[in-house]
Amino acid sequence: MQLYASQLTLPGTLPGPQDPQPFFRAQVQDLKVPHNGTFHSEDLEGYGVGCGARTLPYRMQDRYTRSDEPVSLPCVVMENEHLKATLLPTLGGRLWSLFDKDEGRELLFENPALRIANLAIRNAWFSGGVEWNLGHTGHHVFTCAPLYCCKVTGQDGGEFLRMYQFEAIQRQVYQLDFHLPDGAKQLAVHVRIENTLNEASPLYWWTNTAVPLTPHTRVFSASGQVLHQLQMTDYGVNPGFGRCEMPCPPTMRGADASYPWEIPFSTEYFFQNERTEAAPWEVAAEEDGRGFFERSTQPLYARKMFCWGNLQGGRHWCDYLSKPGQGDYIEVQAGLAPTQLHTAQIGPKAVVSFTQIFGAFATPAADVSGEWHDAQGKVARQVEALLPASRVAAIDAACAAAATLPGGALLFAGDERGGLERLRRAAEGEETFAPHLAFPAPTPESALWPWAEVLGGGMLPDAALPAAYMTAPEWLSLLERTANRPDATADARFQWAVALVENGREAEAEPVLKALAESGSAFAAAALGKLAARGNDWAAAADWFTAAHRLEGDKLDVSFAELALEGLVRAGRFGEAWALWQALPESRRTQSARLTAAEAAVKLGKLDFVDECFTVDYAMIREGALGLANVWFEAEARKKAAAENRAFTEADIDRTLPLPWELDFRMF
């Protein structure tokens, strides 16, 4: 087996500077997700628990473009005589390509472009390959961030690749060991998750594998029982789930959902494989019987199919994420809980591990056609022939035996939060974690260096932008002591207030933020605006955001103008929003600001500007987002009213009009 560093060049872009504003967690973390009464009792366990939005202590990666310039990405390649795997350690460890040399074909959806879009916890995300989602619900915080990466020499003298990171929301260490020994026809990935806390913690893991989608792609797993998403009727509101038998969930209106191409709207269903199943699996096969499969050990038992749907919005979204006509894919996924709106639990100081194995699937074409249950039985027998459950167990045992071996020199470095946490624990006399993994301490060049200084008795400096955020409960007492020292800086007090809010102590944080805002802190004023917006008080939010923008004076960061515009529009103060847009310097007229200004402009009848906005290729629009579409529908209604020489009313808006392809991001 060869294991070597290389470069991958793609057209596209990478995220730019991070947004310095704190994005506070949702006030409600345990969501009340509906279901249609068909759930089994076990389906209710952990349903909606811990699924509210969270980002801190991480910052949003919401600055990127639609550039098509060549981007050079460092990668690590593993290959033997049968397979070639290409991984991207600086982009969350994404398995970008898995090429089967024997059949001469790519097993994954290998995106021909690196097209960053708004979908992850931290916003920036891209489609293609296999992603490893751990920590909190959603596409993980390291989607567009580096992992630590090193080679490891196994007990047999062979090498394998390890990537790992400390995840600071749940304070869990996750580790991926990639094994491709000589002769292996599948890539084995051993996952080890360690809870570093002395208390039980929510556990979220989903492996998302993108595979090509054609009109004949068909999906199978070990169980015919699925939890299927109910029909979505309102963007941003999860409709919940019901339980049914494949292949025809009620929402499909008779369509065979095992053929994702037949599904009109964006949806998902989760195969409820038995937790006693020796080696759960999933297959995506084409009409010729060839395709992709993966198999794992427990507790990775659940499987999922996700598709964007065949409506115009879904097909446009696939093009938007790739190149025109080259972006069709679905995801076959594997998780530790019934759906992605369930969470499992990991015990105090506990370790959860499993091995997942990826490879080429092939069976006679007749095996994947016909009635789904009959085909499923044939596919299951072929999976067992290709990779017996006993072989999965043996591979897992070998991988587990090597999981705590020390690694060699780092090939790539992560974000140093793990090293900082080790420093904090040493200072507090607490036990360390994952001793076999190297977590270097922050260096003076690191964004986390000011916090290492604080641990040694130093003070956070006052700088133009706040220091990296530190919001875990374990930091609160140190933050409080630092913020209340006689020599405390404004940033020390701001950091304390942010941590208080993130830990549910908003009432204590508000006086601190107000005092800072009165002293001229634009970031404190913006944070107060975010708190008001979180409580749906957009009148107050607009006041705070515009105050923050005045304090900032278009000198610190583009986010202040964006927030001020958003606050004014959400508060219905369209004239003020338009005046603000007109006064902005060109450097502050971001795509996000322009989109918000378009919402104000259409309300004011400034349709020439609105039409200009429709010509922009926006980078940050989220799948399913209706803002741009709503502006277009209203603009068309206003034009029609003007042509008929009458006053426009809201009743004139006709959302059944055919929306232009390039503006359509609707998913249902």
Image (cartoon, rainbow, N blue to C red):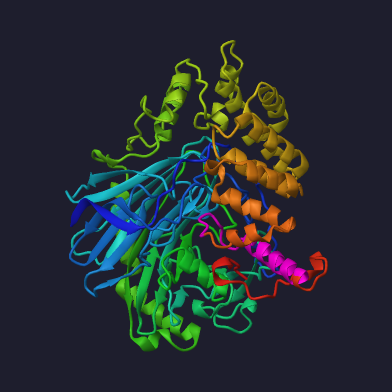
Residue placed most toward the observer, 424 or 631: 631
Residue placed most toward the observer, 198 or 663: 663
Is 376 positioned to the left or the right of 242 in the image? Answer: left
Residue 203: x percent and y percent?
A: 52, 49
Say if residue 268 shows up in the picture: yes
Q: Residue at x 21, y 47 (%)?
A: 155
Quarter of the image where one finds residue 360? bottom left
Q: Residue at x 73, y 44 (%)?
A: 576
Q: Is residue 246 magenta?
A: no
Q: Is residue 69 above or below residue 250?
A: above
Residue placed most toward the observer, 528 or 217: 528
Say if residue 239 shows up in the picture: no
Residue placed furthest toward the top: 486
Residue 249: x percent and y percent?
A: 61, 77
Magenta span: predominant SS is: helix
Residue 419: x percent and y percent?
A: 39, 31
Quadrant, the N terminus: bottom left
Q: Is residue 291 above or below residue 194?
A: below
Quarter of the image where one finds residue 521? top right
Over which residues does the magenta segment extend?
617-642
Is 642 positioned to the left or the right of 237 in the image? Answer: right
- Total number of numbered labels? 0
Quadrant, the C terminus: bottom right
Residue 612: x percent and y percent?
A: 59, 60
Quarter of the image where one finds residue 107? bottom left
Q: Residue at x 58, y 37 (%)?
A: 22
Q: Is residue 620 magenta?
A: yes
Q: Is residue 416 above or below residue 520?
A: below
